[in-house]
Amino acid sequence: MDISYTFIHSDHGEKPRFSRDQITDFLFSHLDEYGDDRSAILKCIAYAYGDAPGQNGFVLTAHEGDEILGVVIINDTNMGGYIPEHILVYIAVHKKTRGQGVGKQLMSSVIEQTKGDIALHVEPDNPAKFLYEKFGFTNKYLEMRLKKQ
């Protein structure tokens, strides 16, 4: 496989190789039971692309030609010093390339590209948890949420 990796940053103004809908469809299909609905994924992309003031981040795609093989979305918190500067919101790899190092390369690229700390949320039974631990992610806190109606 001849896999390429492409970053789209909120502050660089480059034209994305893949549309928001293509990235959303990929994530919706390949996040499996750990995914969100399309509207949530689109909001995350909008944040990463800096659609509103104070929002920024980037999208990293792994692709072979016009086929997406992996996606990572990083949203910047703009709260460095007391909250991690970046949140890895989504990472997914195409089912046909799992176990071939695509996820590892995506994680390596994200870690290299970001300055400051990175946080992520992972379900305890998600197999990707082991990849994150290999990169040094630890579970320091128990996350709790209050969902208001």
Image: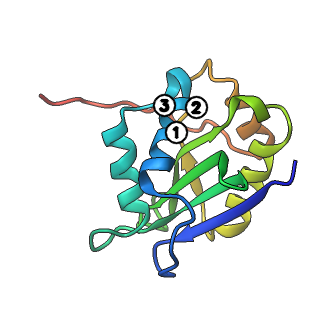
Seen in the image, is 139 located left or right of residue 96? left
- The residue lying at 52 percent from left, 39 percent from top is 27
Residue 27, label in figure: 1
- The residue lying at 58 percent from left, 31 percent from top is 30
- The residue lying at 48 percent from left, 31 percent from top is 142
Res. 45 image quadrant: bottom left
* Residue holding disc 2: 30
- The residue lying at 62 percent from left, 18 percent from top is 125
Label 3 to label 1: alpha-carbon separation: 26 Å
Specify which label sits upstream in the sequence, 3 or 1: 1
Label 2 to label 1: alpha-carbon separation: 5 Å
**Residue type at tag 2:** His
Residue 42's place in the image compared with 143, above or below, is below
Specify which label sits upstream in the sequence, 2 or 3: 2
Circle 2 crowding by C-alpha within 10 Å: few under 14, some 14–19, many from 20: some
* Residue holding disc 3: 142
